[in-house]
Amino acid sequence: MIDQLYRKAVLTVAERPQVEKLAREKMWPLAERFVAGENLESAIKAVQQLEADGIAGNFDLLGEFIESPADCTRFADDVLALIEAAQDAGIKPYVSIKLSSVGQGKDEGGEDLGLKNARRIIAKAKEYGGFICLDMEDHTRVDITLRQLRTLIGEFGAEHVGTVLQSYLYRSLQDRAGLDDLKPNLRIVKGAYLEPETVAYPDKADVDQNYRRLVYQHLKAGNYCNVATHDEQIIGDVKRFVLAHGIARDQFEFQLLYGIRRDLQKALAAEGYRVRVYLPYGRDWYAYFSRRIAETPRNAAFVVQGMLKG
Ligand SMILES: Cc1cc2nc3c(=O)[nH]c(=O)nc-3n(C[C@H](O)[C@H](O)[C@H](O)COP(=O)(O)OP(=O)(O)OC[C@H]3O[C@@H](n4cnc5c(N)ncnc54)[C@H](O)[C@@H]3O)c2cc1C
C-alpha cells in the first residue's frame, strides 16, 4: 500500500508541465544511468558492451504519447532504421515497441494504424531472424494488444513476436491461459503504471505472489518465458523451480533494465543463465525516467542528490 502511495505521488508530480520542463533541462546527466544515450549510435555501442559480458540487448526507442498518424508512421520508420542498423552492426535485432507509439487505436482506411505499422516492423525483424516484443502499457490497452498479438503471431510466428503480462493485474492469469494455444513468448513483469484497485492488486505481496504463478504456469505449459524482474527472491525461486521441474535453460531468460542491478545482470550471465537487458534510448526519455524513479525511493534520493550537486 505504501509502495502504491509513493508511486502515485512521484508520477503525479512528474506529470506537471513545470516539473517536466525543469527535469528535461536538469536531469539528463542523471537519466543517463537508465537511458543508453539519445541516439542510435550510443544504443548500439551499449549493446556491444553488454554482449562483451555475455548479455544480450533489447532495444527500446523511446517515444510515448505520439499523437498524429504521420508521427506514428515516422516513429515506425525510425524503428525500421534501428533494425537495419543493429543488423549492420552484427547484432540480431531484438526490439521492444509500444503499439500506442505506432498508432494503435487510430483508424487508417478501415485498418488499425498500429497493427499496420507493427506488421512492417515485424516483417523486417523476421527477415533478419529477429524478434519484436509488444510492451504492455496501461490496462486500457490490454484487450486490443492481446487481440493484435494473436493476429501477428498468426502472420509471422511466435518466434518473431511476443508480448508482456503484468502480475499486478487481476486478469493476467486468465490472459496467460487464454494464449496457450499460440505457444507465445511472453515477458512477465510486475507492472509499471498507476492502476486503480478495480483492476490491479494494491498490495505488493499479492503482486509478487501472482508473478510467481504466472512464470511457473507459463513454463509448465512448455512456453518460452522472459522473467523480467530485479527481485532477487523471485529470481532465486525461479532458479529452484526450473531445477525441480527439469526445465532447460534455453526455455527462459532473465531480463533486467539498463542501469539497474548491473552486478546482478553480470552474476546471472556468469552462472550460465540467458540474460537480456532492456535498453531504452532516444530523446523522449522523460516518461520512462519518471517510472523508474517511481519504483523505488532510493532512486528519488539519487535524483535529489544529483540536483543539489547542481
Ligand atoms: C526487461 C523489463 C521489461 C519491462 N517491460 C514492462 C512493460 O512492458 N510494461 C510494464 O508495465 N512494465 C514493464 N517493466 C517494469 C516492471 O513492470 C516493474 O515496474 C519493474 O521491473 C520493477 O519491478 P521489479 O520486478 O524489479 O520488482 P520490485 O519489487 O519493484 O523491485 C525488486 C528490487 O529490484 C530493485 N529495483 C527495482 N526497480 C528498481 C529501480 N527502478 N531502480 C533501482 N533498483 C530497482 C530493488 O532492489 C528492489 O528492491 C519491465 C521491466 C523489465 C525488467
Image: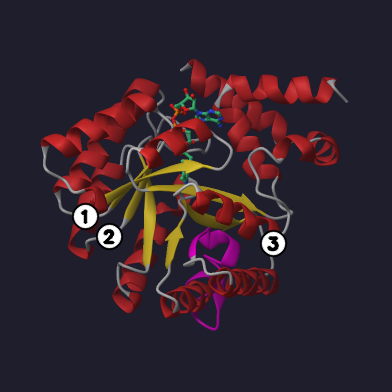
Amino acid bearing label 3: Glu
**Front in this rendered view, residue 167 or 309:** 309
Q: Which residue is situated farthest in the bottom direction here? A: 109
In which quarter of the view is residue 33 placed?
Answer: top right
Instruction: Work out whether residue 225 can be spotted.
Output: yes
Q: Tell me the SS state at disc 2.
A: loop
Task: Give the residue pinned by disc 3.
Answer: 41
Disc 3 or 2, which lies upstream in sequence?
Answer: 3
Task: Give the residue pinned by disc 1.
Answer: 223
Q: Is residue 273 above or below residue 101?
A: above
Amino acid bearing label 1: Asn
In which quarter of the view is residue 9 placed?
Answer: top right
Residue at image location 69% in from the left, 47% down from the top: 285
Quadrant into which the C terminus falls = top right
Image side of residue 168 versus residue 125, left or right: left
Locate residue 205, reporting x and y percent: 34, 21
Q: Which of marks 3 and 2 is in front?
A: 3
Contact? badges 1 and 2 (CB < 8 Å): yes
Question: Within 10 angstroms of label 1, few (less than 14), some, or many (20 or more) residues?
Answer: some
Measure the alpha-carbon separation of dots 3 and 1.
Answer: 34 Å
**Front in this rendered view, residue 30 or 100:** 30
- In the image, which residues are magenta? 94-115
Task: Give the residue pinned by disc 2.
Answer: 184
Q: Does any atom of ligand 1 lie closer than 8 Å to the CB of label 3?
A: no
Q: Tell me the SS state at disc 1.
A: loop
Amino acid bearing label 2: Pro
Q: Is 32 in the magenta? A: no
Q: Tell me the SS state at disc 3.
A: helix
Locate residue 66, reporting x and y percent: 67, 60
